[in-house]
Amino acid sequence: MLSFILLSLSSYVAGAAIERRDAVPAGYVAPPYYPSPHGGWVSDWSESFRKASLLVSRMTLAEKTNLTAGSGIFMGRCVGNTGSAERVGIPQLCLQDGPLGVRNTDHNTAFPAGITVGATFDKDLMRRRGVAIGEEFRGKGVNIHLGPSVGALGRKPRGGRNWEGFGSDPVLQAFGGALSVEGIQSVGVIATIKHLIANEQEMYRMYSAVKPGISSNLDDRTLHELYLWPFAEGVRSGVGSVMIAYNAVNGSACSQNSYLINGILKDELGFQGFVMSDWLAQISGVASALAGLDMSMPGDIHTVPVVLGSSYWMYEYSRAILNGSIPVDRLDDSVTRILAAYFQMGQDQNYPRPNFDTNTQNAEGPLYPGALISPSGVVNEFVNVQANHAEVAREVARDAITLLKNTGNVLPLPRNSTLKIFGTDAEKNPDGINSCADQGCNKGTLGMGWGSGSARYPYMDSPIDGFKARGASYQFFNTDSFPSNSNPSPNDTAVVFVTADSGENYITVENNPGDRTSSNLNLWHNGDRLIQDVAAKYTNIIVVVHTVGPVLLDGWHDLPSVKAILFAHLPGQEAGASLMEVLYGDVSPSGHLPYTVPKSEDDYSDSVSLVGYQIGQPQDTFSEGLYIDYRHFHKANIKPRYAFGHGLSYTNFSFSNAVLTGVTPLRSTPPTRPAKGATPAYSTAIPPASEAYWPENFSRIWRYLYSWLEKADADNAAKAASSTTKYPYPAGYSNVQKPGPSAGGAQGGNPALFDVAYDVSVTVTNTGSRAGKAVAQLYVQFPTSSFDTPILQLRDFEKTSNLAPGASETLKLRLTRKDLSVWDVVSQNWIIPNLGGDYGVWIGDSSDNLRLRCGTAARTCVGNQPSLV
Ligand code: BGC
């Protein structure tokens, strides 16, 4: 965070030459969409909106604006702290990172990262991890959890924060995100899906006083079919909050992009909760309010005044209401949305207050560390929220482990193996497991990437701890260079631990400013060399990779002594025992790759490279459209090193008896959407200026952001309301509520989009000799039509229980109307491009191992088909 301030300060000082916002390439538009749709029209939320609007009608102007922004950076115990409205019973709301556990605290669980969860392909685990995370946030008194992350989607393999999400496919990402939301919110915590949208690289993500943030330029169809898909599912699951990304989309900063917030999110997706900015992403006051932003975080202005304490909202919002520039119903709608989410999760019933402090690990400290002079008090109460969450964390870490190669069945390891273990990743960071703030270093076992998506480890169960606990016979060489004293003997098995790390832009690790600019897709710390050197001396080598995403394996993959390769992803605190269970065969590995592993970085299209420095606004044009990750490899006919979805087991499975059953008859276009339900009625009358006056004898904290105005200021603002000069509203501005687009109608979009078109069932049999879990992946192949579609697209997946040898289980999968549709930019709706055509429904255990094909035309399923790719 400090870096934010320094960054802002330096950009302000450099300030004179403000770089203009460049025009985006032709064809990429963010058309104006006004006004901001009122929330409350979805029946699931009616009762919460009723309670919220009743409360709002009793609140003063300053109480209302006080809830729409934070009290300032470092001005409270949580990473974001709204103002309060104590008179009507609303406390300050605590917002806290991050997607894999409560950040910057103690007695918490450091869960496996999102990418690890994606690799399990296990919906039940996705949800159960969400519940456990929710319990920890609740236990610490967090109202609003800043996760899950479903954007970045992983378009750029080097992108710094892909690991916070669930994988480089919109459907995998959507299940990961939506099931996390359901789990987290089931215990009363408001989840936040982030970052809307197309936040695919770290560098140049933020606006500064001199340079606009990067513009992600993407077409409407790509937006809908890829990047928006997981957000739509999160909204459908009733998520209470959405965080807006730093970057621009099609030239318009996401934090004030009316097309995105008002149009796509609130109207088309029917989002009922509130929209918050990413930290210091807000760059205007009135414009962002009109564009649909509901909460400014952490409240400050993004440039130099961060140091001084000033805001686009809070007191300025009060002024903007009094002088008539922001319509009263816009503020009322924002506050009602925030309070509706609060009621929707039951936070009015005995919700705990924050009992930790993100700014310090000490028991006592300043209450407002960002202030020059601050009262002090107890800030950390060290509440233990771990319960038995280590178990689900371990289960996720274990069931994510992805076996890529296992020549000669070198795995599982016999109990009495003699092991030589190499690589610093096998053991805890010798400087201390939390020695680097926000895990901003790659030292010792890599359990997570760095940045706001990290958490402190309560402990790290390292692989070496795991070997010790097993009583393994091993020698460990805690070095990343091959030691001369390892005395190879023919009976040894060598286990080599290697890593690849990435994170958020405000920390640079080993020359990687978040994105992997310097390491590229290579292993860190000369991992290739270590494996090659070990391979020269040992005949049986197992390589364990802790990684944030795709890495290149080709420097050593085919060496004859490299027998087994495992991706253990980012296991969080549970790196050891989870790995032992797989290495020693207590369980069979059952993880599958949540992204493609290429043979070379040239395998990707150029347009997914990181965008470097550009004069003016950096432009990042998504010219590959739908073709990211496996969609690209299939189209370009490039064989990857390992395909999306690949993952071996110690046993074998067969897929048989597939049955495809029609459920809802389809037409080319979905049935007409339901009309919006009623929304609260808001007065348009400007409240009296006295509602914003400072209370008498109030003792102010320097730099704290308040919503009050000096009496004279408030009175002047009220006078300005009757002036004939009106605020210059943006092009396309209107204050008349719209019925909403045809593609909308409920949370997530037109409810008919989620009608099940086909049920598909398949029997999975364990044909091998060990127990194991299988994943059935279902991909759809669109029939030929005037729409170009990727060859195969994941639409559903299911995992079996642990099947004994010979045992079978029938898995149920489904295809919705949306799964069979394309986004038609002309009619602005989801349409079935070739209604009578034969959709191929392919089932198998990897995107390149699909042998069972059902066809929607004949409604039959046939096995042993040649692979499409
Ligand atoms: C990140 C968000 C995070 C926020 C608060 C930002 O820099 O992009 O993901 O929630 O900070 O720490």
Image: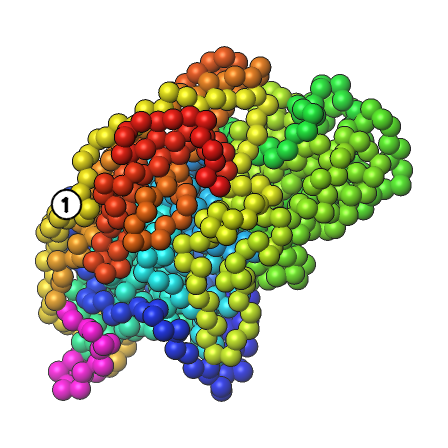
User: Magenta span covers which residues?
Assistant: 715-735
Magenta region, main secondary structure: loop
Of 719 and 394, nearer the camera is 394
x then y, percent, for residue 638: 55, 48
Question: Is residue 411 placed above or below 274 in the rendered structure?
Answer: above
In the rendered image, the vertical position of residue 841 relative to residue 165, given as above or below: above
Q: Nearer the viewer, residue 640 or 203?
A: 640
Which corner quadrant of the image does residue 854 belong to?
A: top left
User: What secondary structure is marked by label 1?
Assistant: loop
What residue does disc 1 label? 671
Whether 724 is among the magenta residues is yes
Which kind of residue does numbered mark 1 sit on? Pro
Report the residue at 52% width, 75% height from top.
Answer: 614
Q: Nearer the viewer, residue 67 or 146?
A: 146
Coordinates of residue 436 in the picture (x, y in percent): 64, 52
- Residue depicted at 43% across the width and 82% down the height: 20
